[in-house]
Image (spheres, rainbow, N blue to C red):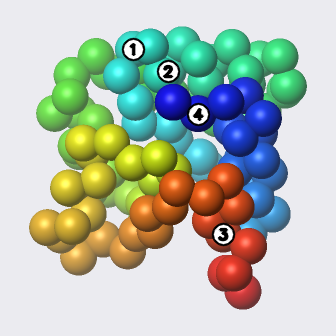
Amino acid sequence: NITEEQFIQVYEVLKEKMKNIPIIIISDEQGCNFAKKVAKKNNLKIILCKDLSKSVFSDFYLIMQSNFFITFKAGGMLVIPWFSKLNFIISRCPYPLFCMS
């Protein structure tokens, strides 16, 4: 699992590199609860998939409608971009986007 510090680090890099693009967290109920707690505590602007729908199929739809997919400590959802034309980054490093220009 991801730590609170790692979550904040990845969030800060995404906000810096992606500017005004909304960040949608796709995770299970436990992961969304964790993200919600960290976001509230640190005033982070995120959208949680479980606030939009409870269905894993809706999560698939959100991913496929995205412009870009970034995963840190990837889970099962990473197969969606593998088999699509969606641009993606998969990383186990807390700073996956520092190399992006």
The residue tagged 2 is 32
Asked whether the residues under the numbered discs 1 and 2 touch, taking CB atoms below 8 Å apart as contact, a structural biologist would say: yes
Secondary structure beneath dot 2 equals helix
Name the kind of residue labelled 4 in the image: Ile
Asked whether the residues under the numbered discs 3 and 1 touch, taking CB atoms below 8 Å apart as contact, a structural biologist would say: no
Secondary structure beneath dot 4 equals loop
In this picture, residue 7 sits left or right of residue 27: right
Q: Residues within 10 Å of mark 3 (few under 14, many from 20)?
A: some
Instruction: Please tell me which residue is depicted at 62% across the width and 65% down the height of the picture.
Output: 96
Name the kind of residue labelled 3 in the image: Leu
Mark 3 vs mark 4: in front: 4
User: Looking at the image, is 44 positioned above or below residue 89?
Assistant: above
- Earlier residue among tags 3 and 1: 1
**Alpha carbon separation for disc pair 1 and 4:** 15 Å
Mark 1 vs mark 4: in front: 4
Q: From this viewpoint, is residue 51 visible? A: no
The residue tagged 3 is 97
Instruction: Please tell me which residue is depicted at 61% across the width and 24% down the height of the picture.
Output: 35
- Earlier residue among tags 2 and 4: 4
Q: Position of residue 34 (x, y in %)?
A: 59, 17
Name the kind of residue labelled 1 in the image: Glu
Q: Position of residue 23 (x, y in %)?
A: 59, 46
